[in-house]
Structures are given as C-alpha cells and as structure tokens.
Image (spheres, rainbow, N blue to C red):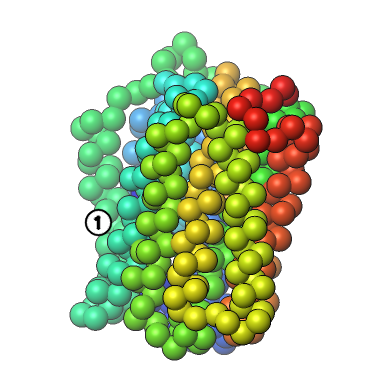
C-alpha cells in the first residue's frame, strides 16, 4: 500500500520545478498533477477490485504493480503538462491495485475490531512513506532532475512486485470467486447504498480524503509562496506524517478495548475542533511556521485515528462481496475526495487559512454523515444499525 503514497509524497518538492519545465500557466494548475493521480486511483479500484474477486488477489495485484512501473517510466518522459496529467491519471489507476486489493486481503482473513487493528498496523507501515518521501524527493533534487523521482517510483514497483511474487499467498479460494458481470456490480452497488452504515461512512471517508487532497495540493505552495522556505517542506511534512503514524499506532493498541466507533467519533470531533481553532488562529494573523506544524500535526493525527476505523466500519456488513464493495467504496472516496479537494485548492490566493477552513468544513460534514449512520448515538462502544 505504501506505493500509493510514494507516488504522491516524494514528488511534492518537485512541483515548482515541474511547473517551469512543463510550462504551467499557473501554480494552481500543478495541483491537477496530484488530483489526477487520486482520481485515477479511485476509478481503478472498481476495475482491480472486481478482477480480484474473479481471478484472485495475488495475480491481479502483481499485474497492477507492474502497470504502475510502466506508467512511472512514461511519466518520467513527459514534456507537457497535459501529457503529465493524463499519465498521472493512468499511474493512479495502476496504483489503485495496491490500495483496494490489500484491503480485500485483510477482509478475507479478519473481521470486526481485529480487522481494524490489522488495518491500523498496515497504516503504520503505509505512513512511513509520508515521513520519509518528501525529504527523499528533496535529496534527489539536489543532485538529479525531477524526472529521477519517477524512475524511483518504477524501481520501487519492481522491488514490490518481485517481493509479492515470492512471498504473498492467495487469500481468496476458488470456491469464493465470482466472474464480473454488470448485474452483480449493480446489485452490490445498490446493496452498499441501501446499507445505511456502509453508505454514510463512505461519504465520511470521502470528506476526510478531500481534506488530505487539499493538504497535499497546497503544501508546496504554502512553503514556496507563504513561508518562503520550500526546502523545509520535507521535514515539516515528515513531522505531520509522524502524527498520523502515532495516531494509527495508538489505534492499533486501543481499538479492541474501546471499539472502533467510540475512537473514530471522538477523533473526528477533535479533528474538526482543531481545524476550526487553526482557522481562527490564521485569520487573526497569528500563523507562524511553529503554529502551522503544531496544528497540522494534531489535525493529521486525528484524521488517521478516524479514517482507518471508518474504513473498517464501512466494510462490516459487506464481507460477502468484499472485493467489489471495497472497490466501490474506493471509487467514491478517492474520486469524490479528489474533486472536493481540488475545488478547495483552486481557491488558493496565498492565504494559509484556506487549508484549515477546508479541513473544518470537511470534518463538520463528515460528522453529520456519521450522525446519520449511527442515528445520533455517538461516542459509545457500539451502536445499533
């Protein structure tokens, strides 16, 4: 799953230079390089999730990672912004295999709070990439052009594909496989929509994803235009990612004791309140690099605590169609999150307050959907559905 994050976080320091070489008309247009990747990652989940329910998890996942390698090589050769955006979309489609299929593998083997615990452990490894990747990208830029970063993506994909070929077992037995057909897909789609818990938690995940897309899209511009310290992007991004990793680590330790619902609802409330306080602080003109780091680290830690549990809760009642259901959830959350995040990011005019304002709005709306899912009964260990 770390390949997904690698394809975004490592290249963030390179965006200003990419804008010059690819002749971007506006710095805001470079956000589409991020948005296209997330959109492709959403659309591709439907394709790879359905295929994994038919052909098994292992071979489809390896094929998807190899496609990621090919698209990485192609993006390294791009010479114009429209071509880069198109290739990033296709790279995202391929990367989606490393997002949806691992979640299906977890669902094949675990349920309930144990599934949430395993998911949190995976996220700890997943989040090691945001901690290291921007600084790695910055180091590469000191000695090589930005195209070398895409060659790094290709090399990482080759290593992961070889590793899975040697070590990954098949978790979906032949008797549990089903060939793709439109009627089955429509049936699963309707089932997910009608299942209240799954539907509203997917919408909540979508909004939390939107806050992440906004964060990723604006970070290069915040450090380049507002703080005037682009070289600090990597270390600060790493610090915020440590907050996310600590959130996932804490969740893995306490989720079986307190329950995924109670933890995620409290974390979502804290996420929204922290974003509101950050927005007010920035609006009063008090924002500094230190306050930005503190607020964003707290915000991302709360996001991590809530989102990993939301994903587990949304899958609770769709286990019999885990692959297709996970892909449908991924399409909605990734594409929807990319579009909402892009909408927020395109309003950038140099004011840092836009970032916490977007997070606060996303958190408040997500809280409303969670209330609908739980019929207003929040903060308990478990609620009736």
Q: Residue at x 38, y 42 (%)?
A: 249
Report helix, strand or loop for mark 1: helix
x and y, in percent, of residue 344 in the image: 67, 69
Above or below, 91 relative to 30: above
Asked whether residue 289 is in view, the answer is yes
Q: Residue at x 60, y 60 (%)?
A: 274
Q: In the displayed structure, does residue 371 sit left or right of residue 250? A: right
Above or below, 65 relative to 167: below
Q: Quadrant of residue 185?
A: top right
Q: Quadrant of residue 57?
A: top left
Above or below, 324 relative to 288: above
Quarter of the image that includes the C terminus:
top right
- Pick out the residue farthest to the top: 175
Q: Residue at x 20, y 80 (%)?
A: 143
- Circle 1 packing at 10 Å, graded few (<14), some (14-19), many (20+), is some
x and y, in percent, of residue 119 in the image: 44, 35
x and y, in percent, of residue 19 in the image: 46, 82
- Is residue 225 or residue 328 the one in the foreground? 225
Q: Which residue is mark 1?
A: 155
Q: Residue at x 42, y 41 (%)?
A: 250
Above or below, 97 relative to 240: above
Tally of numbered discs: 1
Q: In the displayed structure, does residue 247 sit left or right of residue 196? A: left
- Is residue 151 or residue 134 the one in the foreground? 134
Q: In the displayed structure, does residue 298 sit left or right of residue 246? A: right
Quarter of the image that includes the N terminus:
top left
Q: Quadrant of residue 279?
A: bottom right
- Is residue 66 or residue 280 the one in the foreground? 280
Asked whether residue 24 is in view, the answer is no
x and y, in percent, of residue 234 in the image: 35, 71
């Amino acid at each position: 799953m770390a390949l997904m994050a690698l394809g975004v976080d490592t290249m963030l320091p390179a965006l200003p230079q990419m804008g010059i070489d690819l002749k971007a008309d506006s710095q805001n247009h470079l956000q589409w390089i991020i948005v296209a990747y997330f959109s492709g990652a959403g659309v591709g989940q439907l394709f790879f999730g359905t295929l994994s329910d038919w052909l098994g998890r292992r071979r489809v996942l390896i094929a998807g990672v190899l496609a990621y390698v090919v698209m990485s090589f192609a993006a390294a050769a791009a010479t114009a912004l429209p071509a880069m955006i198109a290739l990033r979309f296709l790279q995202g489609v391929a990367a989606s295999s490393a997002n949806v299929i691992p979640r299906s593998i977890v669902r094949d083997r675990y349920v309930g709070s144990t599934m949430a615990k395993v998911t949190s452990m995976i996220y700890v490894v997943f989040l090691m990439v945001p901690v290291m990747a921007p600084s790695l990208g910055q180091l590469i830029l000191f000695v090589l052009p930005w195209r070398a970063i895409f060659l790094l993506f290709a090399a990482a994909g080759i290593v992961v594909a070889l590793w899975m070929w040697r070590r990954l077992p098949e978790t979906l037995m032949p008797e549990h496989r089903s060939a793709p057909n439109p009627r089955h897909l429509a049936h699963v789609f309707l089932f997910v929509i009608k299942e209240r818990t799954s539907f509203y938690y997917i919408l909540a995940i979508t909004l939390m994803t939107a806050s992440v897309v906004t964060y990723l899209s604006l970070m290069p511009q915040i450090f380049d235009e507002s703080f005037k310290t682009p070289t600090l992007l990597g270390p600060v991004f790493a610090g915020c990612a440590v907050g996310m990793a600590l959130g996932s680590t804490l969740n893995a330790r306490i989720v079986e004791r307190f329950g995924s619902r109670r933890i995620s609802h409290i974390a979502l409330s804290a996420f929204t309140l922290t974003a509101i306080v950050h927005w007010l602080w920035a609006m009063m003109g008090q924002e500094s690099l230190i306050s930005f780091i503190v607020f964003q680290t707290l915000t991302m830690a709360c996001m991590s605590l809530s989102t990993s549990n939301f994903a587990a809760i949304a899958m609770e009642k769709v286990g019999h169609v885990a692959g297709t259901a996970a892909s449908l959830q991924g399409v909605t959350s990734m594409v929807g999150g990319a579009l909402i995040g892009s909408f927020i990011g395109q309003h950038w005019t140099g004011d840092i307050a836009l970032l916490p304002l977007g997070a606060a709005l996303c958190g408040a709306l997500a809280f409303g959907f969670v209330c609908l899912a739980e019929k207003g009964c929040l903060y308990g260990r478990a609620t009736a559905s």
